[in-house]
């Protein structure tokens, strides 16, 4: 009774009347909608009915309206919260039971775990876990073990684990997150590529507005202002850069994040008080800010595939990033930018000064970066591959174990009386008397029963 009431609490507009194949995408934090919008829009334009499940937030409604998709708001916490997680799981079960999608795609750690588990329990025909990164890479001890177990459970519940980059796929395989046959990379990687008509080289429009002189070198950063993004190392390196280039400015696009990898209050105060560090806070449209940068630095410790690197490259500026998972796939070293080890402020300082002092090298790398992105990561190409992948899933029915299919068939025949005793007798004579539907794999069961 409670289950029916929970299902009935969903909006009536999500009930029948739409014969398009339904795909449900699920995330934990509403902020992830920013990087999902183009992907969801591409799936809708490819003929899918798209429903997004996310924690509530104003950003979700706006992105959903822009992409023309439906939303189910289910509170999901990022941190470990057993009682709240059980409530979230129940709501996910209710939503999926009501929606009955053909495909689910859950991503981010908590939504990936709870959503994939709910999809498995509801018997969704095709289940995909979109691996956007491995948060456990920067954790240690008990939390690392818990997150690794969560990643393995989410992957075990799904038919495919789609990885954002080749290095992420290799790391997931090394950690035994999933079997190699499940780990997929669509095209060159990236969740949605980059719009090269929106991100392009051009005249700076924001330096004057931000109080930055036109002639000074600007080092840019785009992302969450956290430890995992390498912000402590970046600030230390910038202070060293100022010793050689006192006029330099550091442009930070992003917000301070109160998550478990938040920077210290002391470091936050240093950032806020330094007049040579310019902060914008969260920026919805970053395109014009890249054109105010001479280079971008992303000293990250872990990524899936950093979209900001592609955006910077499309804008014609070189990128300095790390050899960490995901980020090393986004730069061609010495061609489109520079790769450095994570955790070394001196490496950031050396790389920044090299590009500041060599404008010809900087401009050459910027031109090569844009050409490389146009060749491999134009959003229409990447999103087209994604849509083709999901359309292909509709044509490949999930392999259902022979026992389960047989049990369902027997129950249907017995209750419905459509086939009578004749069919029951043919089943009793052995597995060879029953013909399974296309896509069902009988061989494992036959071998188990000694058939040849």
Image (spheres, rainbow, N blue to C red):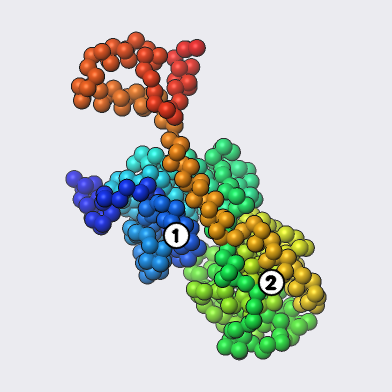
Foreground label between 2 and 1:
1
Report how many numbered discs are placed on residues in the image. 2
Q: Where is residue 241 in the image (x, y as percent from the top left)?
A: 74, 78
Does residue 265 appear left or right of residue 203 in this picture? left
User: At 49% from the left edge and 50% from the top edge, which residue is drawn?
Assistant: 387
Q: In this view, does 403 lie above or below 65?
A: above
User: Residue 174 lies in what quarter of the image?
Assistant: top right
Does residue 306 appear left or right of residue 417 in this picture? right
User: At 39% from the left edge and 23% from the top edge, which residue is drawn?
Assistant: 436
User: At 42% from the left edge and 56% from the top edge, which residue is drawn?
Assistant: 44
Q: What element carries label 1?
A: helix
Q: Position of residue 379 (x, y in %)?
A: 56, 60
User: Residue 336 lies in what quarter of the image?
Assistant: bottom right
Q: Position of residue 361 (x, y in %)?
A: 79, 71
User: At 46% from the left edge and 36% from the top edge, which residue is drawn?
Assistant: 396
Q: Position of residue 89 (x, y in %)?
A: 35, 50
Q: Is mark 2 on a helix, strand or loop?
A: loop
Does residue 183 appear left or right of residue 101 in this picture? right
How many residues crowd mark 2 within 10 Å: few (<14), some (14–19), many (20+)?
many
Does the residue at mark 2 contact the one at mark 1 (Cβ under 8 Å)? no
State the residue in front, 246 or 141: 246
Q: Is residue 101 above or below residue 279?
A: above
State the residue in front, 74 or 409: 409
Which corner quadrant holds the N terminus? top left
Which of disc 1 and disc 2 is earlier in sequence?
1
Evaluate whether residue 126 shows in this view.
yes
Disc 1: which residue: 41
How many residues crowd mark 1 within 10 Å: few (<14), some (14–19), many (20+)?
some
Disc 2: which residue: 317
Q: Is residue 27 above or below residue 355?
A: above
Evaluate whether residue 114 shows in this view.
no
């Amino acid at each position: 009774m409670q289950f029916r009431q929970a299902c009935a609490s969903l909006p009536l507009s999500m009930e029948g009347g739409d014969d398009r194949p339904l795909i449900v995408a699920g995330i934990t934090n509403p902020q992830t909608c920013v990087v999902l919008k183009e992907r969801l829009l591409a799936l809708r334009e490819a003929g899918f009915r798209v429903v997004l499940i996310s924690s509530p937030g104003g950003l979700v409604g706006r992105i959903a309206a822009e992409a023309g998709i439906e939303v189910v708001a289910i509170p999901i916490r990022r941190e470990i919260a057993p009682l709240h997680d059980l409530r979230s799981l129940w709501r996910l079960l209710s939503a999926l039971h009501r929606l009955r999608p053909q495909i689910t795609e859950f991503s981010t750690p908590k939504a990936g775990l709870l959503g994939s588990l709910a999809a498995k329990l509801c018997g969704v025909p095709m289940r995909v876990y979109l691996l956007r990164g491995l948060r456990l890479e920067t954790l240690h001890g008990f939390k690392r073990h818990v997150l690794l177990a969560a990643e393995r459970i989410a992957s075990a519940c799904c038919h495919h684990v789609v990885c954002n980059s080749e290095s992420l796929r290799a790391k997931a395989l090394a950690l035994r997150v999933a079997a190699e046959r499940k780990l997929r990379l669509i095209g060159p990687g990236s969740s949605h590529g980059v719009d090269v008509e929106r991100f392009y080289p051009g005249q700076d429009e924001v330096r004057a507005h931000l109080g930055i002189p036109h002639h000074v070198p600007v080092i840019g950063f785009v992302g969450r202002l956290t430890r995992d993004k390498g912000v402590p190392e970046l600030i230390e390196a910038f202070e060293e850069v100022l010793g050689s280039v006192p006029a330099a400015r550091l442009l930070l696009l992003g917000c301070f994040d109160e998550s478990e990898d938040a920077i210290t209050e002391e470091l936050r105060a240093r950032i806020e008080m330094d007049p040579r560090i310019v902060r914008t806070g969260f920026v919805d449209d970053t395109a014009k800010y890249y054109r105010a940068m001479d280079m971008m630095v992303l000293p990250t410790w872990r990524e899936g595939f950093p979209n900001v690197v592609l955006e910077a490259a499309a804008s014609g500026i070189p990128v300095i990033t790390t050899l960490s998972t995901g980020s090393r796939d986004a730069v061609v070293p010495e061609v489109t930018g520079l790769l450095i080890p994570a955790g070394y402020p001196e490496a950031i300082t050396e790389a920044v000064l090299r590009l500041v002092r060599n404008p010809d090298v900087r401009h050459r790398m910027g031109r090569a970066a844009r050409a490389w992105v146009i060749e491999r990561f134009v959003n229409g190409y990447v999103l087209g591959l994604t849509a083709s992948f999901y359309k292909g899933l509709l044509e490949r029915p999930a392999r259902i174990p022979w026992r389960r299919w047989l049990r369902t068939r027997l129950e249907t025949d017995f209750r419905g009386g459509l086939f009578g005793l004749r069919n029951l007798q043919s089943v009793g004579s052995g597995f060879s008397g029953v013909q399974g539907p296309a896509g069902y794999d009988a061989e494992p069961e036959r071998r188990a029963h000694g058939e040849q």
